[in-house]
Image (cartoon, grey):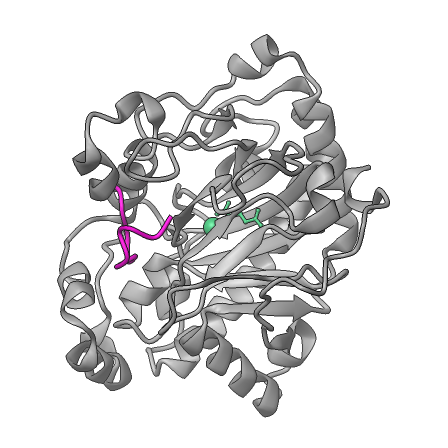
Amino acid sequence: MPGITAFPPFPENVPTHPLLVVDYELVKARDQDEVAKLWEAATELGFWYLKNHGVDEEVRGMFDTGAETMDLSFQEKMKFEQGDNGFSFGYKAAGATVTDETGAPDTVEFVNIAKDDAFAWPEVARRTYPSTINARMDNVVVPFIKKSVEVNDMLIEVFSELLGLPEGTLAEKHRLGEFSGSEARIIKSPPRPGGIDEAKAALAAHTDFGSLSFLHNTLGGLQVMVPGTDKWQYVKPIPGHAICNVGDALTIFSGGLLKSNLHRVVPPPGEQAFHTRWSLVFFTRPGNSVQLRALAEQSSIVARAVEAAPAHLRELFESGETSFEWFTRRVKNMRTNNQKGVDVWRAGRGTEHRPHAA
Ligand SMILES: O=C(O)CCC(=O)C(=O)O
Ligand SMILES: [Fe+2]
């Protein structure tokens, strides 16, 4: 089981950024101090640790499912490949996306499982998956996705309240009944010991495409660029603590108040680089038809934020793209096969305003 295999500790001597620790159960009970901490984390860095989320057992099962899946032959995995049209569900081989505008290939493989397939199981809603995933749908994948939806939806509801939006406004944008890009992702990064340029990303510098990400990892490698700086800093994994981060859609809905921050994955630091790195994310994304625009008419808080937002964000608030268009554009323009010059890469960007960060 990759998640609990012994590995060296996260080194002390690398630049690390401490995240606020938010207690899921306390936020759910609307403990005012905890809700205030969540707001601080989401509006300043856009990243926080989440403890007491109750999903540990499902996370372990998902890592096992990932290990079994990645052990399948390359040929078998490629039967479930995503393709180059911006469809994200299924398998992505290492090197299938680029990590910057020079076309440097990524080094991670991952498999994405649609929330819509988990909720429709055993019916197929969006696509089929490798046998290793089908075998664990009932016991692991569906429970993991259902619990992750519950966690993210609760946090999104709290943001809706804090933004002063009419009750249920953000929930309506993430209705379970509508197809969306929401998905679980299991990522495997091979060991990359020494001799390799540590500054080179395994997974491109990016902001997340959707609303909220619920991430579980055990080895270092995730880095954030703290707003107002131009240096990458590691986020140290803490056992039992998930890492949550805001995605572009919430940034847009909130007029820029909720921060979708730039992050990337590099080889794990120090001795950890000798080990395979596994991570698992559940991404909540708005329903496909939802327009990505600032909800200024529904909240004076958002309206004021729009006024104060920088020009590059204000432009995005009025892009008129639906969630489906936004997501497809971003996935498609990272694909290696689609790179025909730097314009393709740049056209795939979201709220990132540092096109040269990589
Ligand atoms: O592997 C990680 O720690 C982060 C992965 C990530 O940022 C992503 O898949 O969007
Ligand atoms: Fe991400």
- In the rendered image, residue 297 lying in the magenta stretch gets the answer no
Q: Quadrant for residue 161, please give it.
A: bottom left
Q: Is residue 167 above or below residue 113?
A: below
- Specify whether 72 is left or right of 102: right
Q: Is residue 6 above or below residue 120?
A: below
Residue farthest along the front direction in this orientation = 195
- In the rendered image, residue 338, in percent from the top left (x then y), is placed at 27, 24
- Specify whether 3 is left or right of 112: right
- Specify whether 187 is left or right of 318: right
- In the rendered image, residue 120, in percent from the top left (x then y), is placed at 54, 35
Residue farthest along the top direction in this orientation = 75
Q: Is residue 94 above or below residue 322?
A: above
Question: What secondary structure prevails in the magenta region?
Answer: loop
> Residue at horizontal 58%, vertical 65%?
15
- In the rendered image, residue 225, in percent from the top left (x then y), is placed at 43, 63
> Residue at horizontal 64%, vertical 38%?
194
- In the rendered image, residue 351 lying in the magenta stretch gets the answer yes
Task: Work out whether residue 85 or residue 286 is closer to the camera in this orientation and state it.
Answer: 85
* Region rendered in magenta: 348-358
Tally of numbered discs? 0
Task: Work out whether residue 344 or residue 41 is closer to the camera in this orientation and state it.
Answer: 344
Q: Quadrant for residue 347, please give it.
A: top left
Is residue 190 at least partly visible in the picture?
yes
Q: Is residue 279 above or below residue 234?
A: above
Q: Quadrant of the N terminus?
A: top right
